[in-house]
Each structure stands twice: as structure tokens, then as C-alpha cells.
Image: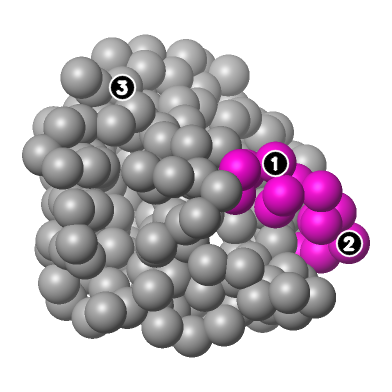
Amino acid sequence: MAAVAPVALLIEDELQMRRFLRAALESHEYQLVEATTAREGLAHAAGRNPDVILLDLGLPDGDGIDLTRRIREWSSVPIIIISARGREQDKVAALDAGADDYLTKPFGVGELMARLRVALRHSTHGATAAEPVFTIGGLRVDFEHRRVFVENVEVHLTPTEYKLLGALIRHAGKVLTHRQLLKEVWGPNAVDHTHYLRVYMTQLRHKLEADPARPRYLLTETGVGYRLQAE
């Protein structure tokens, strides 16, 4: 069964570069979301909560460095700058603003994929205390390969289900409020949409729990939020 495909947000206004990156990413099983302006990119970063962002610095309605700073106000999603600007001061400015990596155009598909793998690996390991595999009881989550098993049988999760489970694992044993989970999984524009959580938590329980009505792992804290059993 295929692993959960990571979601990449591409913020790039140049048509030919978008075509090149679309072909590269889709052939490597990334789910792609595209934006051509800083405004549209910011909206997708908040609304789609991608796993990684590829960001051009020269956008028609703003600078990518400013956009990086705005995203960093609320998100730690990996940001890889893709730019024709090769000067050291541009790279330093982008990294100081919060970017994780910097690729100077033109670049090859192999290098791009390697950088993406590193960014996703660092993001996952940082979020899971450098543990590539989380195990409790019969539940096992392999963050390195983005795969989930229950009693050694692989379970298919949607990207949103996987992201919700990952958020709970990152804070295993702690209560996460509805608002905290909504912001982390769906982005800051969704903090009032508690029905999202009810629907996806029900789906997760049916996939991961032996008895969804009496969950062992995904616990409800009534009126507050949810907690992943840590022991």
C-alpha cells in the first residue's frame, strides 16, 4: 500500500518553471498546490497547511522574503527558496527570515528531490523528538516512510488524517484543545470549525481502534479537545 503523499505548496509566477516543477513533483508522488502571487500563496499556506513550501523570491505582488517572515509568524512548515538570485546576501536574508533551504535556478530534479527529502525528514524528526518510529500497543507510525500500521497490518490514511495523527503524537500524553489542533492541522483560518475535528477523529478511530466507541489511543477530553494515550 502506498505511503501518504506529502503536500507541496509551490508559490511561483513563472509559467515555465511551474510546468517543470509540476512534472517533477507529481512524478515523485507529491500532491501539488500552486499559487502565482504572494497573496494567494499566503492563503494556501494557511488554508491547506502543506508539508513543504517551494517559494520564489520575485513575486508580482510582493517579495518572497517578506512572505517567509509572515508564514513564520504562525507556522514551522519547511520553506525552500527557489530563485534566480544567487548572491550570498539574498540567501542569507532568506534564511534569516526563516527559510530552511535555498536553491538557485537553474537546478536539476535530482537535487530538488534530495533537498525536499531532507526538509521533510528534519521537519518530521524535529516534531517527534528525533524518533522516526512511534509505537504504542499495536499502533505503529513510521514517520520516515509516512506509513501507519495496526497490529502489523498497514492502514491507509488520507493526508489530513495522517497530519491529525502526527499532531497528536507530537504531543502524546498532553491534552490538545480543539483550537490548537485545528490551527496545527488545518491552519489559522480554521480555528472555529470544530466539526472538522469531529469528522476526522471519527474516521481515525474507525481505522485505528479495535472498538471506535471505546478508544484505547485517541481519547476525548470532554469540552476541551483530544489526547493521544502515551502509555
Is 112 situated above or below 181? above
Q: What residue would you read off at disc 1? A: 199
> Residue at the spot x=60%, y=57% of the render?
185
Closer to the chain start, of discs 3 and 2, is 3
Which dot, 2 or 1, sits closer to the camera?
1
Amino acid type of the residue that numbered disc 3 sits on in the rendered structure = Glu
Q: Is residue 83 left or right of residue 74?
A: left
Which dot, 3 or 1, sits closer to the camera?
1
Rendered location of residue 60, percent (x, y) = 76, 42
Q: What residue would you read off at disc 2? A: 192
| Magenta-drawn stretch contains 154 | no
Q: What residue would you read off at disc 3? A: 29
Foreground pick, 198 / 37: 198
The residue segment tinted magenta is 188-202
Dot 2, crowdedness within 10 Å: few (<14), some or many (≥20)? few
Foreground pick, 230 / 49: 230
Closer to the chain start, of discs 3 and 1, is 3
Dot 1, crowdedness within 10 Å: few (<14), some or many (≥20)? few
Q: Is residue 182 left or right of residue 12?
A: right
